[in-house]
Image: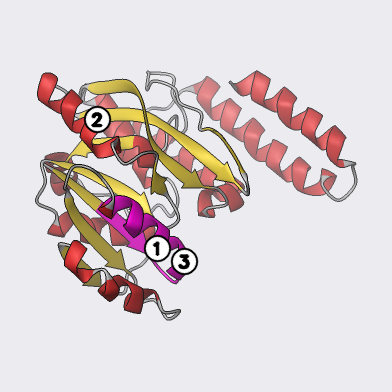
Amino acid sequence: MISIIIISLNTKEDFIRSIKSAIAQTKKSEIIVVDGVSRDGTIKEIYKYKNHIDKIIIKKDSGIYSAMNNGIKAANGKWIYFLNSGDIFYSKKSIENVLNIIKKKNKFDIIVGNSFIKLKTNKFKSPRKRFNKNTYMSCFSHQSTFVRLKYLKIDPFNTKNKYTSDYEFFLKLFLKKKNFKYIHNFISINKSGGVSDTNRIEVLNEFNSINNKYNYRFNSNMKINFLIFYNYIMIILKKLLPENLLQDIVILKNKLFS
């Protein structure tokens, strides 16, 4: 019923953690591994686990969303779930718990759970909000989300966006009035420091472009422009101010935009 797609590119040790986590699930799912032709030994590790993997795709791509689309084409489950290399399931029953929810009431199109973010030895809950008409940027992580495969088959991720095509996809589903089911379950523990974390200004510019195309709102536009300005200022301040003062600034920003 569920296809788990694991994306990798030169992420040998991270891939091992992710595939072990998928294999350890108490309920079997279709496991698909998509690798963008790694050169660090990841491909060798992939084939070590081939007896547990339903489909292996080793193919050059133009980025993470291109790789995710390659996995979508190969998937057969009614629901699809993406796990990036380095991310793991919260528990061995993560998939089983979601399947139980699906079986009880199968009238929704997107299931959104919770995730933790792991930063070195610490972990904290990933922010999560419900999609609404005023949403202007990602409000949950795709590693906490299950989607009916048919929607991704019809309208796969837009590869023109480098960082935010999952937001664009979910926004379009929301505007089409598809049914989002929000659950309390924790689904995954995500590794921090991904490309979206380290390229915030580019990410915010993409959010702006998507909103301007599908759901322009003056307030949303102003908020994102402020965040872009804030990130430019933070780049400068990190070179000038002590760390404790920087933390106070970050806390104030989070209060304003929470």
Type of amino acid at the residue the image marks with label 3: Glu
Tell me the element at label 3: helix
Which of the two labelled residues, at mark 2 and mark 1, occupies the earlier sequence position? 1
Give the labeled residue for mark 1.
15
- Verify whether residue 40 appears in magenta: no
Predominant SS of the magenta segment: helix
Q: Residue at x 65, y 25 (%)?
A: 254
Measured from the top left, where is residue 60 in percent x and y? 31, 74
Measured from the top left, where is residue 244 in percent x and y? 85, 35
Q: Is residue 103 left or right of residue 183?
A: left
Give the labeled residue for mark 2.
97
* Quarter occupied by residue 57: bottom left
Give the labeled residue for mark 3.
13
Foreground: 54 or 200? Answer: 54
Foreground: 79 or 60? Answer: 79
Q: Residue at x 82, y 48 (%)?
A: 236
